[in-house]
Amino acid sequence: MFMDLSHHEILKLDEWLDRALAPLVGEDGVRDLIKGYIIKALETCEISAGSKRDFVVLMRGLLEGVVDDDNFAERLYLVLLRKSYMVQSESSKTVEVANIPLEKLVWETIFEEFAPFGKILRSKVDHDRRHALIQYDNASSAVRCCAVDRAFFGNRFVSVSIYAGLWEEFPGTVYVDEYGPEAISRERLQRKEEQLREYESRLSVLLENLRHAASTKDYLHHAEKFLKIKEEMAEQKVSPEDMIREKLELMILEDPKRSVDVIISPFKPTRKARMLRRPIRMSGHHPIFIPRRPLGCRKPIHLVRGSRHGPRIRTRVPVSRRIIRQK
């Protein structure tokens, strides 16, 4: 099976299909038939996870003559890939601004007008309708923006409301970079965490089915599903270890100073032997280092207290060497 959709997921996907098919199919009865046909196809078609080309080609073939929109299959793939129909927080963080004066449809002016309510992540402008989308970092900023009693851009006809649709469905031009590196990493991490929770719930259900399998055929069927999910997690790099790595990378990206405290590679102790220290004999206020015996000298070394520049060394010279020196 391509997708194991729960009842709640099917309801949410049905709502998205209803909004997406409304401009294309006018009659409610026909639209309901098309929605059921698409959901049934998603549950029964064998397509490898993450293969956009295969998915788009197959859906275009299935919907040929039914849905008159070449981009519908790509939009559906994007929705299923990012689970946008399951994420309500993204819509609650987005504000739709209508009836903007034409001379105000520039990023600098929009930023100055809406930045006081919170951190703006991205903005999209539709010049034909004079509408714009403003997405904040959190939902409270969007609520404050809509609750304030003021005339935006000095025009009382400008209306501000929470955007209930999807970002990809809004036609327009992006006036600011979609995301910075921090926001990209944060969104990717949130998306992977949601995928991990979904995978874990599916794996737990399959484990229960494996424990209570009535026959070998059922056991092999559930085991095959279990292995497919594990392969998908490995391909998409969705695992607890990957989550830890993503969080470390995001932490370092947001605050480079903290990267000093994060040791990703394991510590490898050195195998070098400790340096041998020479013994020290304390004499007065200055320590006296005991040097090694000079080469060729068999007699012991007598130390005499030296100055601050170091100790003076006096050695006993053998008698044979004294005679040679006198000659």
Image: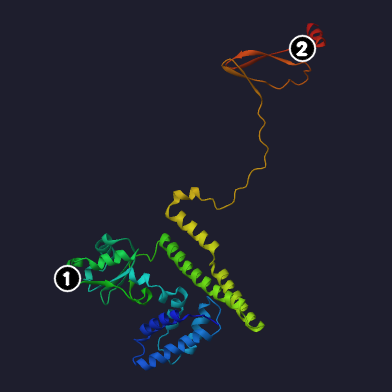
Q: Quadrant of residue 29?
A: bottom left
Q: Nearer the viewer, residue 318 or 107?
A: 318
Amino acid residing under circle 2? Val
Where's the N terminus, which quadrant?
bottom right
Determine the residue positioned at 48% across, 89% down: 62
| Residue 28 as seen in the image, left or right of residue 114 | right
Q: Is the residue 198 above or below the residue 215 in the image? A: above
Residue 221: where, in percent of width, then height? 62, 81
Residue toward you, 61 or 160: 160
SS class, disc 1: loop
Q: Amino acid at mark 1?
A: Arg
Q: Is residue 193 visible?
A: yes
Residue density around tag 2, few if under 14, some if 14–19, many if 20 or more, within 10 Å: few
Residues 108 and 138: in front is 138
Residue 34: quadrant of the picture: bottom left
Q: Secondary structure at mark 2?
A: loop
Compared across the picture, whether 107 is left or right of 197 comes to left
Q: Which residue is mark 2?
A: 317
Q: Is residue 117 left or right of residue 182?
A: left
Q: Is residue 120 left or right of residue 283?
A: left
- Which numbered dot is residue 93? none
Above or below residue 273? Residue 15 is below
297 shown above or below 254: above
Give the percent coordinates (x, y) of residue 263. Answer: 54, 50
Residue 70, position in %: x, y? 42, 84
Quadrant of residue 203 within the rendered picture: bottom right
- Quadrant in which the C terminus is drawn: top right
Q: Which residue is mark 1?
A: 156
